[in-house]
Image (cartoon, rainbow, N blue to C red):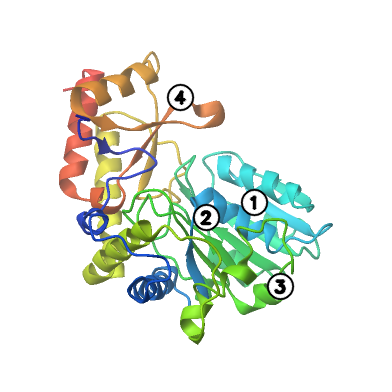
Amino acid sequence: MIRERHLFGPGPSNPYPEATRALAEPLLGHLDPEFLRVMDETCDMLRTVWGTDNARTLPLSATGSAGMEAAFVNTVHPGDVVVVAVNGLFGQRMTDVAARCGAEVVAVEHDWGQPVDVDRVLSAHPSPAIIAAVHAETSTGVRSDIAALGAGKGDALLLADAVTSIGGIELRADDWGVDIGYAGTQKCLGVAPGLAPFTINDRAFERRVETPRSWYLDLGMLGGYVGEAGVKGGQRTYHHTAPTAMVASLHGGLTRILEEGLEAVWARHQEAGDALQAGLQEMGLELFAAEGSRLPELTTVNVPDGVDSAAVRKQLLERHGIEIGAGAGAYAASVWRIGLMGRNARPDAVLLVLAALRDALGRG
């Protein structure tokens, strides 16, 4: 028997019960009319959490990293200038993926732990095809101002990573000028990893690569099966065997979120994050992310001098069944990442992780 874990790291998080229960429902075929109804409802709920009316809003049958691949492979033409705001690991990955698609990448580097400098990004090139940035940088716990990038993007397409922000903090793709966005299910949406909520507007779709290098992630083909197909009605065009149980689970998680109310869910994440960060500072620990730009759903904290980061995380896991994350990149041993996402964004989880950390550090 695997002992239950409290997943308080950077993801995955413990799923909402509604998402778990949906996995036990009878399995449906990917062209079953009942499944197509579930899929269409799921796409419609995704539009709500994305804050968009985009017809092409759908759960890609892969993880958030495939969402990143789909975003670039469908929109980057060889030689396109792509400006990427890099303030953490996932901004770095954007530069890699864009380059593999043949882009001329202009990376705007920032210190890790700092939000994106909007003016520097917007002035990095006079006429980029795409401006890309991470809304909630999972490696550092920092939120950046996507709305300001959208306001100043000009003719460029704005591409946003919302993997850690969707379902946890304010996200308004249409109002903020986001043309292409991708996310994951395993964080604030409270669903197991395996799907990539994705959205692309008509402006970006009209500029797409007609025959992208990826057959599996070709949005033109996918739209005939899901997303726009559900909006427009008519005959579905078979593309691939969708992971029907995972879509049903996402449907359950999204239903749970929207029944609570999206803004209430954002407020719950904020309350939990504020309480955790206050408790950590009361213990004498220092937060890593810049004040004023800290994510409530993912807190980064400096490992105290003389403390073995890995040993503390091992004790938390073995003694308390609590998973927290190490830092990323150069901060792997000097930062902890503590996530309170989805159903874990609640007061009892805050008290549990603080008490366990006090125990592990001998600060009781």
Circle 2/circle 3 CB separation < 8 Å: no
310 vs 143: above or below = above
Q: At x 72% / y 47%, what residue is drawn?
A: 107
Tags 1 and 2 touching, CB below 8 Å: yes
Q: Mark 4 or mark 1, which has the lower sequence index?
A: 1
How many angstroms separate mark 1 from mark 2 (CA)? 10 Å
State the CA–CA distance, disc 1 to disc 3.
16 Å
- Which image quadrant: the N terminus? top left
Crowd rating for badge 1 (residues with CA inside 10 Å; few <14, some 14–19, many 20+): many
Going from N to C along the chain, the mark reached first, 1 or 3, is 1
Name the residue tied to disc 2: 144
Q: Disc 1 designates what residue?
A: 85
Q: Which residue is mark 3?
A: 154
Residue nearest the observer in this picture, 125 or 345 = 345
Q: Which amino acid type is marked by label 1?
A: Ala
Q: Which residue is mark 4?
A: 334
Measured in 3D between alpha carbons, the distance from the residue under mark 2 to the one under mark 3, in whole angstroms, is: 19 Å
The residue located at (29%, 28%) in the rendering is 284
Residue 320 in the image: above or below residue 63: above
Relative horizontal placement of residue 113, taking residue 344 as reference (left or right): right
